[in-house]
């Protein structure tokens, strides 16, 4: 779940499920400043580092046990590609097999995209819940802190308006893929004669 860059900026963004723009808005810098800091090309200004520090301290060390304890979804792996048609399959069955394989590959792509999106939203929900429980890094900024966190929750609501519907759609895609795999298996195993 942690990005390839282990910079404090990248870890904070990943742990709390923030975009570079969201972190930049809180830090009071432009988005390219966050990108340069994450890439190690240029450090953040001192004031931004002071604002980043309490968030960075709230991020646990990056390891699988921490991610599992936080309830983060494990990286999703797409199912294997559909099987090739067996040799000697008659042409009508070979065409049906090919069409089903193409449909299965399309469904695998859609399912993968949905699972990755769901994992990102779950990380954002967990991170925002933790952010809401933190105190503002500097007490005089409490109003700005609360406004920033409220904006993050509003953005999440727009990005994920109906989590239950998304979960149902994912299950339906998985069921459809399982049905296609069963038909592919039946086509490949059927006795002709």
Image (cartoon, rainbow, N blue to C red):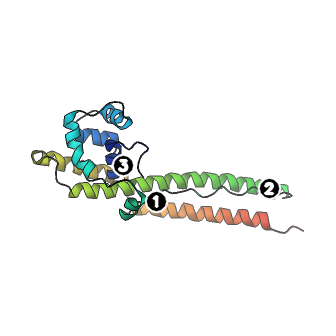
- Asked if the residues shown at circle 2 and circle 1 are in contact, with their CB atoms under 8 angstroms apart, the answer is no
Nearer to us in this view, 157 or 130: 130
Q: Position of residue 111 (x, y in %)?
A: 54, 56
Q: CA distance from mark 3 to mark 1?
A: 14 Å
Q: Position of residue 153 (x, y in %)?
A: 27, 53
Between discs 2 and 3, the one toward the N terminus: 3
Circle 1 residues within 10 Å: few <14, some 14–19, many ≥20: few
Does label 3 or label 1 sit earlier along the sequence? 3
Q: Residues within 10 Å of mark 2 (few under 14, many from 20)?
A: some
64 or 13: nearer the viewer: 64
Q: Mark number for residue 94?
A: 2
Residue highlighted by disc 3: 14
Q: Residues within 10 Å of mark 3 (few under 14, many from 20)?
A: many
Q: Are marks 2 and 3 in contact (CB under 8 Å)?
A: no
For residue 34, what is the image quadrant?
Answer: top left
Q: Which mark is residue 85?
A: none
- Depth check: give the residue in front, 23 or 8: 8
Q: Is residue 123 left or right of residue 24?
A: right
Give how far across and how far down residue 8 sits, in percent: 31, 44
What residue is shown at x 28% (from left), y 55% (from top)?
128
Task: Label 2, secondary structure: give it.
Answer: helix
Q: Quadrant of the C terminus?
A: bottom right
User: At 28% from the left edge and 32% from the top edge, which residue is drawn?
Assistant: 30
Instruction: Residue lying at the far right in this picture: please name it.
Output: 193
Which residue in the protein does label 1 denote?
74
Residue drawn where x is 20% and y is 42% of the image: 51
* Residue at disc 1, secondary structure: loop
170 sits left or right of 29 in the view: right
N-term mark: 2 or 1: 1
């Amino acid at each position: 779940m942690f990005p390839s860059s282990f910079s404090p900026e990248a870890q904070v963004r990943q742990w709390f499920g923030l975009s570079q723009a969201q972190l930049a808005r809180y830090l009071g810098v432009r988005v390219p400043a966050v990108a340069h800091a994450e890439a190690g090309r240029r450090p953040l200004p001192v004031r931004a580092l002071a604002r980043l520090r309490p968030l960075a301290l709230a991020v646990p060390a990056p390891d699988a046990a921490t991610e599992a304890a936080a309830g983060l979804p494990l990286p999703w792996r797409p199912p294997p590609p559909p099987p090739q048609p067996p040799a000697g399959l008659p042409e009508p069955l070979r065409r049906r097999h090919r069409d089903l394989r193409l449909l299965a590959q399309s469904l695998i792509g859609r399912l993968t995209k949905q699972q990755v999106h769901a994992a990102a939203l779950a990380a954002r929900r967990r991170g925002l819940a933790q952010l809401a429980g933190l105190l503002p890094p500097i007490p005089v900024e409490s109003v700005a802190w609360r406004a920033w966190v409220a904006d993050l929750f509003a953005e999440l609501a727009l990005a994920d308006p109906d989590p239950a519907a998304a979960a149902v759609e994912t299950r339906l895609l998985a069921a459809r893929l399982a049905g296609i795999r069963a038909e592919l298996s039946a086509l490949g195993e059927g006795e002709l004669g």
